[in-house]
Amino acid sequence: MKIDRLVSMIMILLDKERIGAQELADMFEVSPRTIYRDIDTINMAGIPVRSTSGVGGGFEIMRNYKLDKKVFSTADLSALLMGLSSLSNTVRGDELVNALAKVKSFIPADKAKDIELKANQIHIDLSPWSGNRNIGPHLEIIKAALQESKLLTFGYSAHHGNQTKRTVEPYQLVLKNSDWYFQGYCHKRSDYRLFKLSRISNLQMQAETFTPREYQKPILEISDIVETMQTKIKIRIHQEVMDRVLDYCAYEEFTPDGEEHYTVDFPFIENDYYYDILLSFGNKCECLEPLHIRSEMKRRIHDIAALYEN
């Protein structure tokens, strides 16, 4: 998280005489280019960081500089508190508690109430309403394995219910669309894989350590790819499921059809995931066109009905 990284970088620069861009990049698992952008941000915030080149070069805060509590505005401190508090609710750990405590130490006593009010105006809670209760314990095990470079073993339920046993070098925890994943090098596949935590069972951290290899980050932004794969189908829905359909498309795709129904231009990819979305709307949704998708929906509904005939 950028806010947490900036605060941590300031603390590191105050603590060390000089530190290199690559060392900071390795520490925060980002590129050197990102570190240079962060340093520019810190400079613009009023903290004078200079760089020196050559052997032993790096970044350092100008000598005799004292960090003035006034360097952070009320808006800055509110944003920092909001981000760190929301993250600490999801990923618990001493490092986040310490960062939060350091940020709070910059708050002037006469502005504490105003800053707390602004920080609480937006609350980000990434924990699910319900679901797999193993996610929290799994997060703690994976965090420990990441910090100590230890191998993880677990059972994994892959596509179509295939059950496999994996031994993996963990490299990164990922929160994507309210679901937790971790990226690691899978010994079984001899390649990097992204594992969804809800599909993991019997997760164990091994005593064996590994030497980190050149890390290949996962591709998480696939909206352009999905858009090229999607087509629009026409469905007719009852108003009772309108709120759920809005999770997948905008109001502009809805056209009133009578007093209680709408026709919707619905984004669709012909795979099990999208067919299951349509089926989840039950008898409040009818696929109107194209004909081959309507026919496939009919076949799947018939197969479900056949389960209950006996």
Image (cartoon, rainbow, N blue to C red):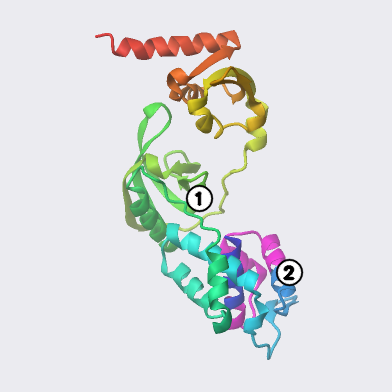
Q: Residue at x 72, y 80 (%)?
A: 48
292 is higher (above) or lower (below) than 115? above
Asked if one can make out residue 239 in the rendered structure from this viewpoint, the answer is yes
Residue occupying the point 59% across, 24% down: 268
Q: Reply above or below: 159 against 80.
A: above
Task: Name the residue rendered at 52%, 43% in the picture.
Answer: 177
Judged from the image, the secondary structure of the residue bearing numbered disc 1 is strand
From this view, report whether residue 283 is shown above or below residue 21.
Answer: above
Q: 141 or 90: which is nearer to us?
A: 90
Q: Position of residue 94 (x, y in %)?
A: 42, 70
Nearer the N terminus, badge 1 or badge 2?
2
Q: Looking at numbered disc 1 in the image, what kind of residue is underneath it? A: Val
Quarter of the picture containing the N terminus is bottom right
Residue 16 visible? The answer is no
Q: Which residue is mark 1?
A: 174
Characterize the local packing of mark 1: few (<14), some (14-19) or many (20 or more) Cα atoms within 10 angstroms: some
Q: Position of residue 53 (x, y in %)?
A: 75, 75
- Region in magenta: 12-38
So how many labels did they put on this image?
2
Viewer-proximal residue among 234 and 62:
234
What is the residue that sits farthest to the front in this orientation? Answer: 259
The quarter of the picture where the C terminus appears is top left
Gap in angstroms between the C-alphas marked 1 and 2: 26 Å
Q: Is residue 37 magenta?
A: yes
Residue highlighted by disc 2? 40
Splitting the image into 4 quarters, where does residue 156 fall? top left
| Amino acid type of the residue tagged 2 in the rendering | Asp
Mark 2 burial class by Cα count in 10 Å: few <14, some 14-19, many 20+ = some
Numbered mark located on residue 242 in the image? none
Of residues 179 and 207, the one drawn nearer to the viewer in this rendering:
179
Which structural element holds mark 2? helix
Q: Residue furthest left?
A: 310
